[in-house]
Amino acid sequence: LYTGNFANLTTKWWITNENITENGMYGQRGILFNSTIWDAYKGTILVSIACALIAGIIGTLIGYAVSKKRRSKWANYVNSMAFLPYLMPSIAVSAAFFILFSNKHINLFNTYTLLVIVGVIKYIPFASRNALNSMLQLSGEIEEAAIIQDIPWIKRMTRIIIPIQKSSIISGFMLPFMTCLRELSLFLLLCTQGFILSTTLDYFDEMGLYAFSSAINLILIVTIMLSNLIVNKLTGASLDEGIGN
């Protein structure tokens, strides 16, 4: 559009349904019919959901445990260790796990298992920090009253603590999910191009197909916005409210 000529607008990048080499397509189908993009999208959603669920649960438990024993040196130690992955560069974490799990003894290279393991470790700080902040806002008398009533721990969590701090706890799940969707440097060394959406974006950038990489960015943005909207409608919580708390 910077030329002022609307004739430059085209839908070929989206709706081309055959492998063609002319017009700068390099043998690629349009985005809507490109199996490479949509297979990578499915893989990205799978990894993101798994990382969000596992990191969210672990982070919530860490936040709860630290808040209950916050005056203990062990609680401070656990809190510091849980936050440590956040301080490490993503590419350094990726290189470490590449060396650890890509050898003749243990070879998990280019598997969803490895991406989930790395993602969970990297994103636990998001969930644990949100959970800790939300737990510290709760008065201890609330849980003490439940303990006096002989209510089991699991019911105290699911019926009292989690509903009260729903927004903050849900944001502890949503932050890993959204971060994982767009993550590149953390996964770059651990899988091939085309395995997940961010590495596919890198692949199209290297080929010079910037329309494809821009479309992938658009797909990720729409996915994040829809995810936040759906969670908001289903639970009444939203990411911005959770961060605000």
Image (spheres, grey):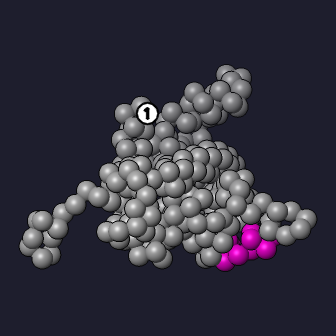
- The answer to whether one can see residue 137 in this image is no
Q: Which amino acid type is marked by label 1? A: Thr
Q: Quadrant of residue 28?
A: bottom left
Residue at the left extreme?
4
In x, y percent, where is residue 69?
71, 52
Q: Is residue 216 left or right of residue 141?
A: left
Above or below for 112 versus 163: below
Q: Is residue 125 left or right of residue 26?
A: right
- The answer to whether one can see residue 105 in this image is yes
- The residue located at (61%, 70%) in the rendering is 188
- The residue located at (68%, 67%) in the rendering is 190
- The residue located at (36%, 41%) in the rendering is 229
Secondary structure character of the magenta stretch overall: helix
In x, y percent, where is residue 139?
54, 42
In x, y percent, where is residue 2?
14, 75
Pointer 1 local density, CA inside 10 Å: few below 14, some 14–19, many at least 20: few
- The residue located at (32%, 59%) in the rendering is 13
Closer to the camera in the image, 26 or 92: 26
Above or below for 9 versus 99: above
Residue 182 part of the magenta-drawn span: no
Callout 1 secondary element? helix
Closer to the camera in the image, 230 or 74: 230
Above or below for 230 versus 66: above
Residue bearing mark 1? 235
Q: Quadrant of residue 30?
A: bottom left
Quadrant including the N terminus = bottom left
Q: Which residues are magenta?
A: 92-100
Q: Is residue 42 left or right of residue 28?
A: right
Tally of marks:
1
In x, y percent, where is residue 154?
69, 30
Closer to the camera in the image, 185 or 104: 104
